[in-house]
Amino acid sequence: MEKKIVKIMVNGDWHELLVKQNMTLLEFLREELNLTGTKEACDEGECGACTVIMDGRSVNSCLVPIMEANGKEITTIEGLAKGQQLHPLQTAFIENGALQCGFCTPGMIMSSKALLDRNPCPTEMEIKGAIAGNICRCTGYNMIVEAIKTVTEPKG
Amino acid sequence: MKEYSVVGKSTPKIDALDKVTGKAIYTDDVKMPGMLTGKLLRSPLPHAKILNIDTSKAEKLTGVKAVITGKDTGTKKIGVTSLTRDFLWDQTSLCIDKVRYIGDEVAAVAAVDEETALEALDLIKVEYEELPAVFDMFEAMKPGAPLLHEQFKNNISNEVFMEVGDVEKGFKDSYRVYENRFETHHQALSPMEPHSTVGSWGGDGRVTLWTSTQSPFQIRTILAYVLGLTEGQVRVIAPTLGGGFGGKVELMPMDVCCAVLSKKTGRPVKIIMSRKEEFETTRVAHPIVMEMKIGVSKDGKILAKKFRNVLDGGAYGAGGAGGAGPFLSTLFLRLDYKVANISMNAVRVCTNKTIAGARRGYTGPQVRFAECSFLDIIAEDLGIDPIEFRMKNAVTPGYTTQTGLKITSCGFPEAIEKTAECIGWKEKRGKLGNESIGVGFGGGGSVSGSSYAPDVTPMNYTAAAMVKLHKEGFVTLYSGAMDCGQGSSTVITMIAAEELGVSMDMVRTVVADTDICPYDAGSWGQRVTFHAGNAAKRAAADAKGQLFETVAKKLEAREEDLESRDNRIFVKGSPEKGMSFREAVYLCQTDHNGQEVVGRGFFRHDEKPEILNEIFASGFGNYCAAYVFSAGTAEVKVDRETGKFEVTKFCFAQDCGTALNPIAVKGQLEGGLHMGLGFAVHEHLKMTNGKIQNPSFLDYWIPTPFEMPVMNTILIEPHEKIGPFGAKACGEGSLAPVAPAIANAIYDAVGVRIKTLPLTAEKVLKALEEKEKGKS
Ligand code: FES
Ligand code: FES
């Protein structure tokens, strides 16, 4: 497999690396950068565990060929907190019981963040819509939806 | 009652911070220098003889470091049941002479990367001679059916039979006798984290396994046995677990393969299941056909019941978690109502299909669907309200069932009443048919801590814990119990903190490392809060006792007058007469020439080890120290044109004893409802001739937030005297009420009775059409 150099900004830092062209963004993050917070649960784009934000949009990183991420800006779960200061969504998930095993959690939080970035005051239906592609086997989603609600800005 | 300072308050999980920041390390995140990727070659046939395996081409491929077959992993069987019950054992790590289902493990490779490993699998040539296969369990039991395992006659791996009272007389004395048949299907467990293992065989002959398991100590016992090592030569470390639900309680072929591949290559080897493998080859819930007969008096007392459960076990598993299936399927049916005459039989049958094992609630959700649907049918015929019918027969505190189950605390009647009230039973039941809206009830009992210890410690205790006090006032709690995500590590930390009288942040908890932590039988059978919790409490009490001895001397007070609370130890009633917890630890160490203050605790159910084994075999006797009860009510709206229905509301009431961490209990109920709804309505692993047709999230369909009804959860908290701070279990029973509550609600809405799961729109529509036909 031919290798190519890619330059990708991840969590604010540029990474320039020689990679196999058939690599996915998920593999790049987990294997090359050792950012293992992003999870792999299906590798088929069907569960959302691998969700990251690419140029402002949430994507299933297991479906993104690395060449497509070239030159783009990526945010992963590791890039959310500022030092010890958690992102409000992270605090909300902790306080509202919105996680159990935690395997869906990074993807769930990234999907919610992408939603709130473009729509700071979503309705309950919009929240559910934003995480409908993220499967959680543990929580029944209720506490996740409630957690996200606590960080939405009131309408008006 | 005493005000607690830690338990009883909703507390965030101790690992939540790591989980929301992506720092939590799961098995797939474990990386080591030189680590290789392993892959398994699986059988494409449901039943065949292996004539030859040629691995030579694969071995020559650049990047391949080792290829192994059954010759390397050996003839010793894997499983979870006690080593003394080896007659049930049916599976070798890799197949030796035969494959028994599509997906059966035949060979394994270790290579420098995944691509190479997959390429190597393609190069392994296996010659098979296909054998006739059997997929239907009733066919499998017929004489002359293809036999999966020589030792299982008629393909029956194990059977339970028991009788109490005089069931025939009971039926004779009955006002009416009913008979019915119900059936359930394959549900996949699908934890979000696939089964994952890293094995490393050290040069010193010791093996370390990092693995996604609910039961590190059982993995150690069986792995040591299979590899011919002593348990001391095997270390099992369970990293953060991404969900288990019963599917990760047993040693899997991949675990043994990682160890053996690592031995061959001298390098660590990692195997991760693909999602397809996860669906096809890990574990599923037993499909069960349940034939029941119930006799009742005119005023609605159940006088006799007789039933037969036939469990579809798939290709293996009677030596695995599957072996408990027949026993448990009967246990749950003789736990919740007072019945004097019972006859029951349960068999587990082998078929050439994927393997059934423990699924959250283990057979409870299946038999509860049958029992609760049936009770509604009977109540209607008798003209009694279904809730009233249950209240007449429900077990009550202090009751001992006919088969010897000793109910201690029991919130079942209260749970029934509360859920009925919550859904608006009186106003709605039987009254909204013209809007095609109905309400239904489901519920029953479950265990609070399965007391069977599959691999036997010297005294058959099932959980142990250790507490170490640091002179700066910190505490380390060591427990063998694995947190599957439900928050068990959080709750045992709360228990230790409460008992010691320190705040949560003073306690650090180390779990699930067999070299470091004391023994625990595993996180299954609703046993962690109860067993590991009790062990943690006793370990803390032991350490506290040592501090009190020192402090009492110093204060010239009596030990029994001391109290420990909010990081201080003082004389009860005079808080100024005391010292800080930190000072007390320091003093205690100084008093003992620097000796560490270490507390030890364990828990086991009162029954003697021999008796527990006997109970497991015969069914008679008190299986657990306590029992829990759950009840649920559903409201559904049915579309008569299409048969489609929506579950709009669900009320859950759970008898959990003292709710130590209420938000975690609620999490279990909501999660249970989600998995229960999947089981009842959406999830069905479909098979044709043993081939799974929908092994992906997209085709299998786990409910999304849009399918979830409005949920109300009610905690019923009777104090359980044997439980830690009055607590009982709550994680598994919550699945069971869901399917029957929905089925009964559908009946209430449109008058059709669906007796097979899943409850689909097609079935409802067909039943509606047949009902119409019947009318005209
Ligand atoms: S791992 Fe990417 S969607 Fe499932
Ligand atoms: S918390 Fe376990 S999958 Fe969501």
Image (spheres, coloured by chain):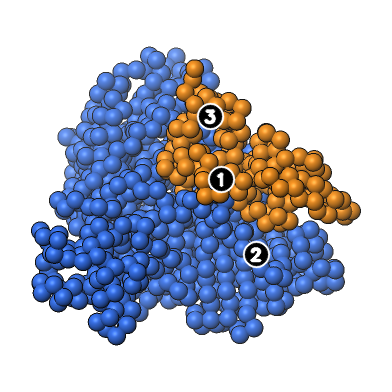
Which image quadrant is residue A105 in? top right
Q: Colour of chain B?
A: blue
Q: Amino acid at mark 1?
A: Ala
- Residue annotated with mark 2: B31
- Is residue B685 left or right of B626 when viewed as pictured? right
CA–CA distance in space, label 1 to label 3: 22 Å
Say few, some or many: other residues with alpha carbon within 10 Å of mark 2 (under 14 / 14 to 19 / 20 or more).
Answer: some
Q: In which chain is the residue bearing label 1?
A: A
Which chain is drawn using orange?
A: A
x and y percentages locating residue B511 in the rendered image? 44, 65
Q: Residue at x 75, y 71 (%)?
A: B67
Find numbered disc 2 in the image and state the secondary structure of the residue it sits on. loop
Provide the residue designation for mark 3: A127
Disc 3 C-beta below 8 A from ligand 2: no
Q: What amino acid does circle 2 point to?
A: Lys
Sequence-wise, the earlier of marks 1 and 3 is 1
Q: CA distance from mark 3 to mark 2?
A: 35 Å
Query: Residue at 56% across / 49% down in the picture?
Result: A83
Along the viewing direction, whichever of B137 and B98 lies nearer the viewer? B98
Q: Is residue B16 above or below residue A87?
A: below
Q: Position of residue B367 (x, y in %)?
A: 39, 46
Chain at numbered mark 2: B
Q: Secondary structure at mark 1?
A: loop
Residue B249 location (% of width, % of height): 48, 61
